[in-house]
Image (cartoon, helix red, strand yellow):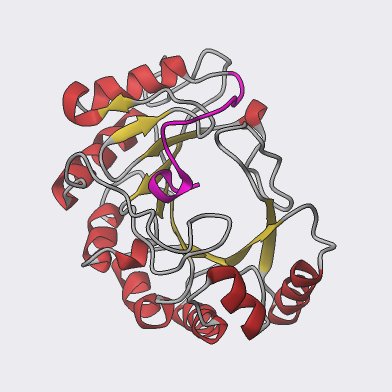
Amino acid sequence: MSREAGCLYDGYSRRIHYLRLSVIDRCNLRCRYCRPEEGGELCRARPVLTFEEILEFVEVAVGLGIDKVRVTGGEPLFRRDIVKLVAMIAQVAGIRDLALTTNGSLLAEHARPLKEAGLHRVNVSLDSVDPARYREITRVGRVEDVLAGIAAAREAGLSPVKINCVVRESPDEPDAMRVAAFARREGLEVRFIREMDLATGRFWQVIGGDGGRCSQCSRLRLTCQGELFPCLFSDLKFDIRELGSEEAIRRAVAAKPESGRTSRNHSFDSVGG
């Protein structure tokens, strides 16, 4: 529901102004906590949103009060012509914060073009700085590519560069401690995210970030197929192709639950975490 012009408030007086925008449900890594070793490819019931559909939705969302947009995936840099899409979004007047979350493996070649397109900052997933451990966690990844991507992002002026590190229980785990030491040396911010489970409703507050704080949640999530989720841990969704962008947004805001429960109808791959 809307309390005042240009602002969106849900039924719990939370101002909703943050859009997480998944642009692809594919990824070039197979992280153990996210995807199976083989198979698991999503079978799309319909095509992903076009750039024009994404832009139209963002324009409507910003007109209603969204001022923070994060591009996610899957792996967003895996989407063809992602720099063009970022440039289109960056031209929407009213966005004060335009960010992107990436696994970093393709960031070295994209960092400067993304900055020139209007991207403000990036979050890079980094669960270990040890090459062997990183390969074990991602099954196919090279930590050297991620480190090169982080360096390229800093050189391009994407700021701040934040590190997302997934942990089983706490930041005191060996891999997490090494990532923290790397972040300190490089002057980077780091956020520790405990492994979550949508189906059982297992989630925690992000250490060093705002995620997981239901009482302060300001987010909507749009999948690459046009389903708008008011909450990551809920099966509630609203189809922007069927309802239109504005109606879907208003319904999603009105239906936003007080806190997350469980979800069995989507995955981190498709909704962007």
x and y, in percent, of residue 245 in the image: 24, 29
Tell me which residue sits at (21%, 67%) in the image: 81
x and y, in percent, of residue 7 in the image: 42, 25
Q: Main secondary structure of the magenta part?
A: loop
Q: Residue furthest right?
A: 172
The stretch in magenta equals 258-273
Tell me which residue sits at (48%, 56%) in the image: 35
Against 125, is 269 above or below? above
Total count of labels = 0
Horizontal side of residue 273 vs 208, given as left or right: left
Give the image quarter of residue 180.
Answer: bottom right
Horizontal side of residue 85 vs 107, given as left or right: left
Give the image quarter of residue 4.
Answer: top left
Observer-nearest of 184 and 42: 42
x and y, in percent, of residue 14 in the image: 56, 23
Observer-nearest of 11 and 141: 141
Give the image quarter of residue 116.
Answer: bottom left
Q: Is residue 238 magenta?
A: no
Observer-nearest of 55 and 258: 258
x and y, in percent, of residue 241 in the image: 18, 30
| Quadrant of the drawing holding the N terminus | top left
Against 26, is 273 above or below? above
Tell me which residue sits at (67%, 65%) in the image: 189
Observer-nearest of 271 and 17: 271
Horizontal side of residue 162 vs 220, given as left or right: right
Q: Is residue 262 magenta?
A: yes
Tell me which residue sits at (40%, 76%) in the image: 106
